[in-house]
Amino acid sequence: MQTKRMTVGQALIEFLANQWTVDGDIRERTIPGVFGIFGHGNVAGLGQALQQCNAERPDLMQYHQARNEQAMVHQSVGYARMHRRRATFASAASVGPGATNLLTGAALATTNRLPALLLPSDTFATRVADPVLQQLEMPHDIGLTVNDAFRPLSVFFDRVQRPEQLFSIALAAMRTLTDPAETGAVTIALPEDVQAEALDVPLEFLSEREWHLRRPVPERGPLERAVAAIREARRPLIIAGGGVIYSGAETALRALAEHTGIPVATTQAGGGAMPWDHPQYLGGVGATGTTAANRMAADADVVIGVGTRYSDFTTASRTAFQHPGAVFVNVNVASFDAYKHGSRLPIVADARETLIALDDELRGARVPADHAARIASEKAAWDAVVDSAFAPSGLARPGQSEIIGAVRASVSDRDVIVQAAGSLPGDLHKLWRVSDPLGYHVEYAYSTMGYEIAGGLGAKRGLLADGDDRDVVVMVGDGSYLMLNSELVTAVAEGIKLIVILVQNHGFASIGHLSETVGSQRFGTRYRRYDPQARNFQDGEILPVDLAMNARSYGVDVIEIPTAPDAINRLKEAIAVAKASTRTTLIHVESDPTIYAPDGEGWWDVPVAEVSTTASAQHARVEYEQQRTAQRPLL
């Protein structure tokens, strides 16, 4: 057997560079690059390996800087979304705080079912120097390290305690990354001494290896039972989730909807599965959904969930589906999701393969005429609501709906909107008019404040890798911007263009609104000077924070929209300038956080204090108890 003498770090980098994902006719590198922030835990291991690779074969594995370890994973996830889970990046971090900074990213990747490879460094396997700088010591378990915190957040976790373990661990990690049913955060903990140890590496381990994505077809029995239920339905509804996008099933979904007349509603991850103006598309469903989708969901007798994990926002905390005999046909490559809602009709298979099969089996079946008429009526009514919400009001500080309308009117149908947290995800789910399958990326499974800029950067990398020059537009509130804005420096350093719309609310707009509905009166959600007498931040003067200047200090082009009656027109002009530019541009606009988007008639279960001395909380509890009566039990 031919071998090559290498360190563990060198072997891992060369191994990753030779892994390929194959999806039908598409073949691409599974790991096209590595993000890394170096410290004593990895500078002599993976750091040296990346430097050597860059010096000897710079085309083999690209290294990218980052400014925050969490943001490295966010970039990986944004990239993976644009590549429909066929590719992602690796993120290398040092011992201790560098490693644990990856934890939020790990949770985000796994919750969203999107692949990301995490390579946190670990303390000495030999314990020759013990404890080392930044080592956590637990007297009851000396073998425990901070990296064990990744175990519940990863779909795969292992630690390379000896060099010889690298082979089996690396192969198992790749299998998981490329498994549509299991993918998420894959973590390989690398002790700092083991990274630098040498071993004889079989050349077979370093040779090119292909990982073919599984696209399982539906079994005949489950498919026939599902078809029978759909044929009997009077008011069927399709819920399209992220699995439709990752499977490349949007064409098959559209064909099924057109041939049968069955309406389609989407989850946040499913945004883009249907174009907004398609006659069968009703928009987002659930707590942040449209009246069109939610009213049809309430009466649906057969709910066809395709590639959705049925989060509480999708189901409006189990209040969305009110038909007493509602049947769930759940199509999912993961059996864990296919059996949700107590479904008796799960189809554990690929979304695209199943939609094609359903279309063939349901040929000639059409929804009743009265159902078709209602679909058209509800869609037209909601479209009119959105038109009204987008209409400029002439206010100096416009509402968020107006801002969204101005952005949508100023970008192309192929441009990508990226968002994650605050009030924007809900408003975008209701209002954003998606025209392209990859045009809508709202990370809402974990709804991570601070994802937006890093995730947008990853999405743009993903597009550039495919030679796609469409713009990525990041919308972010000031609360999320303050959480994690440092990757603007990365965009400047690499000359990667983003358009960032910074909506200045002077606080947490989303939780402020939610706080009012649960009787907490926006407590702790305003950015104000501290009032030493009241001992709170409720009514002090607005903080003199200049986020536009902050972005400008990073080397970003900044356009500030004056607080004036023509703010919306100025915003449109600014976006035109940003689109014409080749540089990252941040547009700063003030909004009124008390002007809300139109109500989509969805609900979200946020428990209210059962007893309280405040009238607002007492009133909120009464409303909460009334809403809970509509919750559907599992069985």
Image: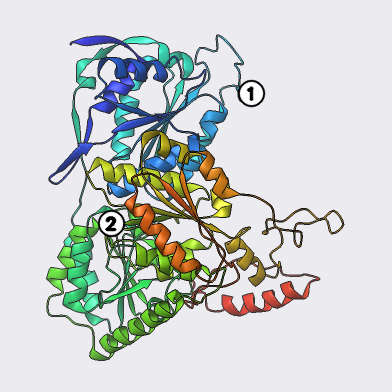
Instruction: Where is residue 147? Give x, y as percent.
Output: 52, 30
Q: Secondary structure at mark 1?
A: loop
In the rendered image, is residue 386 in sight? yes
Task: Identify the residue under disc 1.
Answer: 137
Front-most of residues 500 and 261: 500
> Can you say whether 371 is above or below 31 in the image?
below
Left or right: 633 in relation to 383: right
Residue in front for this viewpoint, 211 or 463: 463
Query: Among all residues in the image, which is located at the extreme bottom?
Result: 370
**Could you tell me residue 241's position as x and y percent?**
34, 61
Q: Amino acid at mark 1?
A: Glu
Q: Name which residue lies at 27% across and 67% down.
A: 274
Tally the numbered discs.
Answer: 2
* Quadrant where the N terminus is found in the figure: top left
Q: Could you classify mark 2 by the number of other residues whose Cα lies within 10 Å: few (under 14), some (14-19), or many (20 or more)?
A: many
Identify the secondary structure beneath mark 2: helix
Q: Which mark is residue 245?
A: 2
Q: Is residue 218 visible from the viewing direction of this image?
A: no
